[in-house]
Image: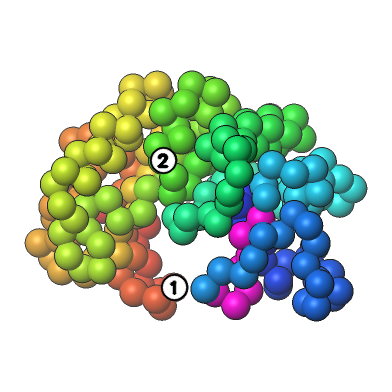
Amino acid sequence: SYITLDTAQSYRFYWKDEWNTTLPDFIIDKKSNNSDYNVKYWEEAWKNILYKGKDNYVEKLLSLGFDGIDLIVSKEKNLQSGEIDTRQKMIDLITEVAVEIKKINPHAQVYLHNKIDLAEEERVLNVIDGVVKESLLFSDGVKRPENEIKKDIDILDKVVKAKKIVLVSESISQKNEIKEFCTFTAIRRYIPHIEKGDDIENVKKGCS
């Protein structure tokens, strides 16, 4: 399962009816998606929802039997301002949530999803089991620029060197793309995941 650390979603269990008319202070504004909201993820009210308060998100997911949780940091830039070091606050939050997950279930796996550059921080790398990277080689069916790929590879290789898991997911369907992706991930010791379409039956879990 997963938790989006910097986004509140109006369809989640924690959403209160009154927020539809008056947003609480920790919510900044609505994103382009009608159900997603930017949050001040460093505030206690949001942390209580995620992992500190009664019946929090982490507890609920683990009580349902999930043995792993992806910690997702939105790719979309948060609309924050002021003198707060938002990157450091996110590092703090990832560390705190991961520690709480392991406290409840020491065998649960914790993965950083999307903002893989945060894995360069030692505090983050020490508390996660690995990272999930989407669209490493291809984006919307087009090969990504080599300099962007290299930048991500440098980070992912550091994660592998730290004996952590790297899972790479690509949405591809052409045989030559699949061959390139499978060869590439095998060489670099990444775990491949191929999505061939929106239909769940078209999801291939690996390259074999």
| Residue at which label 1 appears | 200
Residue 116 disc label: 2
x, y percent for residue 175: 13, 65
Q: Earlier in the sequence, mark 2 or mark 1?
A: 2
Q: Residues within 10 Å of mark 1 (few under 14, many from 20)?
A: few
Residue 201 horizontal side relative to residue 3, left or right:
left
- Name the amino acid, label 1: Ile
Which region is colored magenta? 33-39
Residue 84 spot, x, y in % from top left: 61, 38
Label annotation for residue 70: none
Q: In which image quadrant can residue 10 be found?
A: bottom right
Secondary structure type for disc 2? helix
Instruction: In this rendered view, identify the residue nearer to me: 159 or 38.
Output: 38
Q: Quadrant of the N terminus?
A: bottom right
Of tags 2 and 1, the one toward the viewer is 2
Question: Is residue 1 in sight in this rendering?
Answer: no
- Residue 95 position in % (x across, y down): 62, 31
Question: CA separation, marks 2 and 1?
Answer: 26 Å
| Quarter of the view holding residue 37 | bottom right
Q: Position of residue 194 (x, y in %)?
A: 31, 60
